[in-house]
Amino acid sequence: MVKLAKRNLPQTSWDYLIGGTETETTVARNRLSLDSLAFKPRVLNDVSSIDTATSFLDQPMSMPILLAPVGSLQIFDPGGGATATKAAAEMGIMSIASSVCTPDIEEIAAASNASKVYQLYVRGDENWVDDIVRRVIDSGYKAFCLTVDTSVVSRRERDIAKGVSPTSPTTPGDMGYQASLNWQDVERIKQKFDIPLILKGINTAEDAAKAVDHGVDVIYVSNHGGRQLDHGRGAIDLLPEVVDIVGGRAEIAFDSGVCRGSDVVKAMALGADAVGIGRLEAWALAAGGLEGLICCLQLLQKEISGTLALMGIKNFSELDASFVTAASPVTPPSVVSAFPLLNLEDPGY
Ligand code: FNR
């Protein structure tokens, strides 16, 4: 699938998708940290029937997977966010629409009956934000998500080196609104609107505690797939301290580096309630559109189910942190290192 995506995409789009910031250390650490966890399986537990179902935001999920918000998703499939949510409906999972992908709020809402979240980058004043939140509520989204790790556009050197910007341009003036976001804005939105609020891009126990104090409903632990701050920690390393301090007062979403069912099981073991995929979603769309994404999600579900069975677990309620432990990684980490047979012909992929 990743190979097919590479074949189908122009180099600029491929680089936009796989790239991270500056040295891409955070990208590699995301894989390194996931690979630095080993399973501690149990046996003889009758795993003849496995159930991958969970719930998130009070919505039933066939498995704990979120289609993460991806800007300019239409680069990978012309239907953009509408195609993603159709795949989510087919698979019984949730999709998160990015405010910088097409089509618009209402069209994505109408594209499927899947549970959906709308994610916003702030590009206007309070009235601008309020207008969007109202449209999101009126369109039936289950939650509103503010991404908070993107105060400035990071240096994506794969793009800079080619002198291209694969995504739609944003004026520096518009970006100022996102840079000035603060906890009062969170409080204002929380008080004014009756829709669950997700903060995406929480990286520390300190911020998770603040978010809970502000009544945030979902803490989304993510380093943006290593596309924002370089030299961050591997994302799964952030999870335990956040889960610990939140103590069940909010739900926890997690992403960054997830490519396999085993990655999903590791995150769930450490306390996530749902796990996002970003690049995997876009690779699948670029490889085969709607069918490609459905096929990818079926494969992911098979991997999750197989991992649970081999761990001696029938469903996610039996899983906890005692099923994972620190271990030495064996694979040099990279954005595609979860697929050792990939052997992309171009070493620079
Ligand atoms: C993203 N991500 C992202 N996040 C967000 O909140 N709004 C957005 O518009 C985008 N756009 C975007 C574009 C592309 C091409 C990628 C790869 C990612 C981040 C995304 O939601 C998620 O946090 C990461 O993709 C997770 O890491 P993995 O799964 O890609 O390793």
Image (spheres, rainbow, N blue to C red):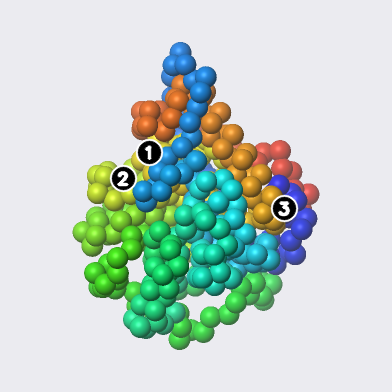
Give how far across and how far down residue 3 sits, in percent.
74, 49
Q: Which residue is mark 2?
A: 243
Coordinates of residue 201 in the picture (x, y in percent): 40, 59
Which three-letter amino acid code belongs to the residue tagged 3? Answer: Gly
Front residue of 244 and 234 = 244
**Where is residue 159, by image quadrant?**
bottom right
Category of crowding for the residue at label 3, using alpha-carbon neighbours closer than 10 angstroms: few (below 14), some (14–19), many (at least 20) = some
Residue at screen point 51% across, 70% down: 106
Find the distance from the CA under tag 1 to the CA under tag 2.
Answer: 8 Å
Q: Which residue is mark 3?
A: 288
Q: Amino acid at mark 1?
A: Leu
> Does mark 1 have its CB less than 8 Å from ligand 1?
no
Q: Residue at x 24, y 60 (%)?
A: 215
Mark 1 or 2, nearer chain start: 2
Q: Is residue 285 above or below residue 248?
A: below
Which label belongs to residue 270? 1
Q: Amino acid at mark 2?
A: Val
